[in-house]
Image: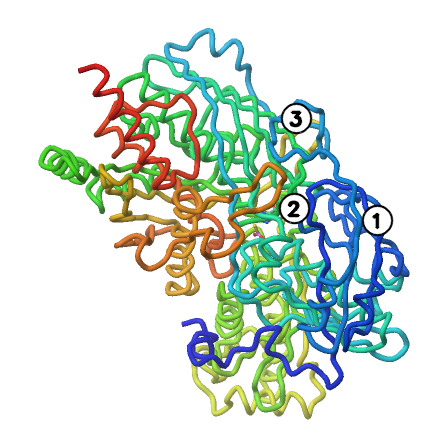
Amino acid sequence: MNYDVIKHVRGESLFLDDYDAPAGTLHAVVLDSPFAHAEIVKMNFDKALNINGVKGVFTAEDIPGENQIGNIIQDETLLAEKIVEYVGEPIAIIVADTPEAAREARNAAEIEFRQLPAVTDAREAYEKGLLIAPPVTFSSGNTEDAFAHCETIAEGRVDIGGQEHLYLETQGALAIPGESGTMKIYSSTQSPTAVQRVSAKILGVEMNKIEVDVLRLGGAFGGKEDQGTPWAAMAALAAYNLRKPVKLVLNRAEDMRMTGKRHPYSADYKIGLNSEGEILAYEVTYYQNSGACADLSPAILERTLFHTTGSYFIPNVKATGYMCKTNLPPNTAFRGFGGPQGMFVIESAIYKAAEKLGVRAHEIQKKNLLKEGDYFYYGQKAERVNAEKTWTEAEKEFDFEKKFNEIKEFNARNTLLKKGAAIMPLTFGISFTSSFLNQASALVHVYTDGSVAVSTAAVEMGQGVNEKIRSVAAKTFSISKDKIRTETTNTTRVANTSPTAASTGADLNGNATILACKEILSRLKKHAAKILSIENAESIEIIDEKVYVNGEPTEITWEKLVNSAYFERVNLSAHAFYATPDLHFDRNVNKGKPFAYHVYGTAIIVATIDVLRGTYEIDEVDIVHDFGKSINPIIDIGQTEGAVVQGIGWLTIEELVQNEEGKLLSNSLSTYKIPDLYSAPKNINVKFLEESENPFGPLQSKAIGEPPFMYGIAAYFAILDAIREVTAYTPTNLIAPLTHERVLTALTESENKRYESE
Ligand code: LUZ
Ligand code: MOS
């Protein structure tokens, strides 16, 4: 079990807003733009400053360093200067004794704007030449030639919605100024070093003046990979100017309004198959709605391009992506990081091709699955491929044949309820696609009582990474997990941290932890050999907290050994560094080996629609997933279930709606619906693929965070399948999410058609 769980259930776990802030801590709120695109004509804070308890108002002019927080591209200010480009863009920070006073002062601020035309649609931005960065194309083979040889060609457009992260803990930070211009920042971030780097830049100080500390996050899902940073930098800015601790925590409405989301995509595709049903060619153009600044959009678009062919081998591929600049909050990392959008488009293409051929999509899916030794179209050789293995396992375990027959029978017996099913094969690349980010380090201390403390770059956000790190440390030392504590993630103990992201947290930091533990273990074995007067330290082993020589137990326990090593002045601390080997990617040709390995799996989802009301339920999700050798099966099942439900939510009931002026209308939990106990699948069965190994994962495990999210794609096609039981509904263009409203429209439109033809 994740050792945080008991504290969570008892309400004992601390999150940022729960910390006992030092006496005299002030509270900051963010004044943000009410317009999607406007010029700031005049700002007057006189009335705001007169409100009781207000201590200061800070704008771009009060930034002593550089007003620049861009990550991949330097195109984003912390506080707007002359122009605002989205509703929710931070303009000023207002600081007071209480959050209430600060919010009151925010209402009293007088800002004059001159509104400018806003663009919220990706294709419209593209037409107007509004791009964040130049387009990117990945390709292999020759699609033009291949299409000439295709028996069946399907073309269409796909529109995919974004998604609100809705982490339980909103964004926030607490900045405490220290002596000599130093600053300690507690931040709810996946990326402590990003907070450190950006805060230093904003304050105009060196990074060694800034210490960032993270205990845990109440969820993140990518929403705090880049976008945990500005709030911390703002708290630091206010704390720096006022020489007082400052806390800044967004409330839910502010968080939903000001932060970016999963990127909506629009795409055009063309897919070609031969008479055998083999996919010969695939062309796709993605219009990514990037929002007002780059944020992580280029990396996210790249991951879309990496996952363009889904779980399939396609010999001729051409994929182009445009990062379209719109007047929406900068869209950002979200579980899957562009992968889900790419995979949804290829699944849509296959669905439409199947429709044309008069076969079921899964016949085409199965025929085209990746095989050992195939090459991904970006040049990486597919190794230890489990695409077919998980498919056939799932087919056997969950009896697809029987399921489809039962659905057929059900549909024959029922007119008001109809069932549908779809299968989703998964292939997801593990590693940051920016190769340099695939590094981590660990600092391990063994104390004289035999207890152990581990610091790494990993941020605990509910995914159980700390528990996994405890497990690998305990296994490496062969001591009880109870002796191992994971410390907060802190930039003074572990420097230059990559974000805990890309599903790599346990892999990178677990591997670094193993290296550090082995270093200490080797010193301890040498010491044991010495006190036992044995020449060969190789014959020493520690098993279950006991020293063994050539397989024979001795009287020396772990505690005794550690204690005696201390008195002999043996170093009981170690720092270790891990970098994923052999990664490379050449952006001149867009070929290389970007991923250490891939995660595979297959899911089948069954849905039931209510023909009169257009509502639906997800009856069942059955998954065979490739976990490698799981370090912690309960955590991994939890991650799988959570991810698949989140994936289903994205494509079914979660709908972001903006008005034409770029204002978010689905801005609270009453208008933005996420899966709850009632709408979540009735049943989720997760089966572990047996005999899977992974030399790149700690203890042969595989990454788990993001991959299962994409099983949710099957829910969309299962609902579509059920709709088609009622009508010959065959829209040329697919739209996600498939809300109850959209299902009802699909059903009633055909209803009208039926009456017309009678
Ligand atoms: N973040 C990132 C990610 O910077 N690079 C990635 O490849 C990535 N992939 C998934 C999630 N976050
Ligand atoms: Mo992420 S989408 O922060 O792995």
| Quarter occupied by residue 407 | top left
Relative to 50, 598 lies left or right: left
Query: Amino acid under label 3?
Result: Tyr
Residue 201 seen in the figure: no
Image position of 662 with respect to 44: above or below: above
Residue that numbered label 2 is attached to: 329
What residue is drawn where x is 90% and y is 61%? 64
Task: Categorize mark 1 by other alpha carbons within 10 Å: few (<14), some (14-19), many (20+).
Answer: some
- Residue 497 visible here: yes
Q: Is residue 695 above or below residue 121?
A: below
Q: Nearer the viewer, residue 159 or 539?
A: 159
Quarter of the figure with the C terminus: top left
Secondary structure beneath label 2 = loop
How far separated are the C-alphas under marks 2 and 1?
16 Å
Give the position of the N terminus as an image quadrant: bottom left
Q: Amino acid at mark 1?
A: Glu
